[in-house]
Amino acid sequence: MAFSRRREILFVYSVKDANPNGDPLNANHPRYDAETSQVLVSDVRIKRTIRDQWLRDGLAVFVDGEPKTLKSRVDELKAGLGVDTGKEALKGCIDTRLFGVTYALGNESFSWTGPVQFKWGRSLHRAKAELVQGTAAFATKEESEQRSFRNEYLVPFVLLGVYGIANQYPSVETGATEDDVDKVAEGLWQGTINLITRSKVGHIPRFLLEVIYREGFSGAAGALDEKLHLLSPDATDLTEDEQLAIRSPKDCLLDISGVSQRLQGVAENIESVKLWTESELKIKGIDELERFFENRLLQQKR
């Protein structure tokens, strides 16, 4: 049965000495806003993090990241799921049920709007990418001692905020269930921990808030990531130079007071709040949030 309660997700994670989301058209430089010096992460990268975790968990996923044609992938799914049509095959995949899909193969074509969508992630402070150079393991030619050079970009440290929403209405068409949408937050948290490729090791989940609204409510608090504020450890505003100098969670304080106030404004429509934190990042306003939603709080400390 399709899920019937709207949800919002607010996620904060850190990246240290790694590339959060390289731009292949810009020498794999981390995506960034040149005006604000904020590092950016695309919604596609965020969904990939979740998909990869679902694959590790043994769930059926349409976009599995392997180099293959659409036809070969769909044929694999038909055989594995024991179905005859592309629509049946994609109904059997959690990522298409939640994120949607546009499909055209043979005589079949359809398009689903995904119930779960994310904004682009954005760093909570100014940051700067650094170019790192190295040498390859082998010489470029026989009898040559000259090795080739490699260049790569990384950010020394950055805290990123991500916002997502689960809209119950498209789930009627895609078939996404409550059990499916329950797996989004877990996939985001655990999937970030498991980002351990060479360019991604150094990703750590720091804070996750999931708001589950009462059945029948079609509004939302909206853009909760824009209510986050990063402060110095003594709770004062960070200068631009101090923002660039952040190298660990100990160098800052995450202020979620604006998030708490915004949620209190729609509290009568909130059924429950899930809250996951980790101990290294200090959070201002979390006590207020916990007190206000005490009887509706599903807390999971990590």
Image (cartoon, grey):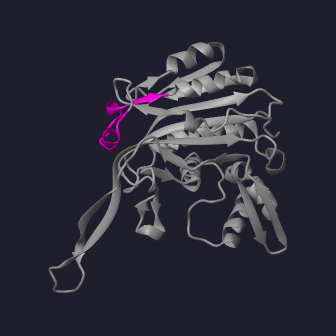
Who's the residue at 85% across and 73% down the image?
107
Question: Horizontally, is 158 left or right of 10 in the view?
Answer: left
Q: Position of residue 37 (x, y in %)?
A: 41, 51
Q: Is residue 180 magenta?
A: no
Question: Which residue of the protein is positioned furthest toward the bottom in this rendering?
Answer: 142
Q: Position of residue 289 (x, y in %)?
A: 57, 19
Quadrant where the image shows the N terminus = top right
Question: Horizontally, is 143 left or right of 208 in the view?
Answer: left
The answer to whether residue 251 is visible is yes
Q: Position of residue 129 (x, y in %)?
A: 35, 55
> Which residue occupies the foreground of this view, 223 or 146?
223
Image quadrant in which you'd find residue 282 = top left
Total residue callouts: 0
> Which residue occupies the foreground of this view, 296 or 237?
237
Question: Horizontally, is 37 left or right of 270 in the view?
Answer: left
Q: Is residue 8 above or below residue 301?
A: below
Image quadrant in which you'd find residue 61 = bottom right
The stretch of residues the image draws in magenta is 238-255
Who's the residue at 23% across and 75% down the image?
138
Q: Is residue 254 magenta?
A: yes
The answer to whether residue 83 is visible is no
Who's the residue at 67% across and 47% down the image?
117
